[in-house]
Amino acid sequence: MTALIRRVPARQLAGYWFILPCLTVTTLFFIVPLFMTIWMSFNQWPLLGHPTFSGFSNYVDLLQDSSFWASLWFTVKYTLVVTPAIFILAFALALLVHRSVGFVGFFRTAYFLPVVIGMTAASLLWTWMFNDQVGIFSAILMDLHLIDEPVQWLAETNSALGSIVVMVLWKAAGFTMVILLVGMQAIPEDLYEAARLDGAGRVQQIRYITIPMMRRTFALALVMSVIGSFLAFEQFYVMTRGGPFNSTITVVHWIYRASFTYFKLGYGAAMSVVLLLILLALSVLQLYLLRDDND
């Protein structure tokens, strides 16, 4: 008994050693930068020169910044369009590759392959594909006699948003598919066999078994998708540069401009803190709405 008591502190100490690397990385690359960003948001922080404490002035300016609210509203619209589209496509792909049929490994790899391409590289690739002079989309539509002249996909707000949504679908659906596929594979096969014995068809199995059993997986995938959509930057910066007429500026793009174009680092930090609070509130709301009855 005495020996056991002596071992307990050592085992607890070993546990702390195991989490120490993760704790160190989290502290260095998340906790410390977070508190530095919060501190910067309370200062007028030029790129060169000494910062001066300004209290809540950056937050007051933010409330009166119509460009910030316009970029936030555009980001919300983009999220509302792209998140359901990714979810529906990824769920359909996961259902397809969940079956044990021939070449299923090939299709899983093919659907996931765009995920390994960097967002900037993918944006450059699709910018050329949407180009009205050398892009393939206008050429295909003209060959099919659906249009008479090349379309400038990225020159108008709605077509630019639609074009970027299509690119993001191609790029990100495979990642969400993998998350949903893991959730599907965790469902016991006995439930499907019992449903088939009761006469349930494929659609009924999906409705009454697959979807209810994947609520936690849906919550994880939805939170990650919404956060990724709110933090969208590269695709808009590369494909439209915020145009036409600043109509496709996301909130992260506006933070970038304020910080590194206008050199208002304190103001950019204040916007980052507000964005963090918005994402935190949205994540809590999503997890609450998709909570399991056993949670």
Image (cartoon, grey):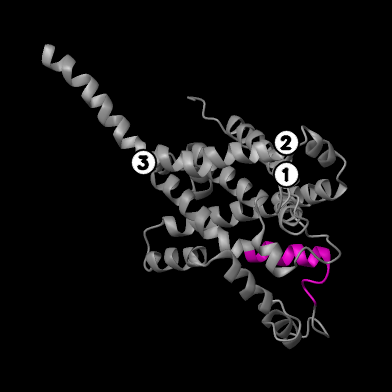
Which residue type carries mark 3? Answer: Pro
Looking at the image, residue 141 lies above or below residue 181 = below
Res 53 seen here:
yes
Q: Front-most of 235 and 145?
A: 235
Q: Is residue 288 magenta?
A: no
Q: CA distance from mark 2 to mark 1?
A: 7 Å
Residue drawn where x is 12% and y is 12% of the image: 2
**What is the quadrant of residue 286 in the picture?**
top right
> Are dots 2 and 1 in contact, CB under 8 Å?
yes
Tell me where residue 228 appears, x and y as whole percent: 61, 51
**What is the quadrant of residue 65 in the picture?**
top right
The disc at residue 83 is none
The disc at residue 266 is 1
Range of magenta residues? 152-167
Q: Front-most of 229 and 42?
A: 42
Which residue type carries mark 2? Answer: Phe
Q: CA distance from mark 3 to mark 1?
A: 31 Å
Mark in the foreground, 3 or 1: 1
Residue that mark 2 sits on: 42
Q: Is residue 60 left or right of residue 162?
A: right
Looking at the image, residue 157 lies above or below residue 193 = below
Secondary structure beneath label 3: helix
In the picture as drawn, the residue positioned furthest to the front comes out as 49
Tell me where residue 223 appears, x and y as whole percent: 58, 42
**What is the quadrant of residue 129 in the picture?**
bottom right
> Are dots 2 and 3 in contact, CB under 8 Å?
no
Secondary structure beneath label 2: loop
Q: Is residue 166 magenta?
A: yes
Residue that mark 3 sits on: 21
Magenta part mainly helix, strand or loop? helix
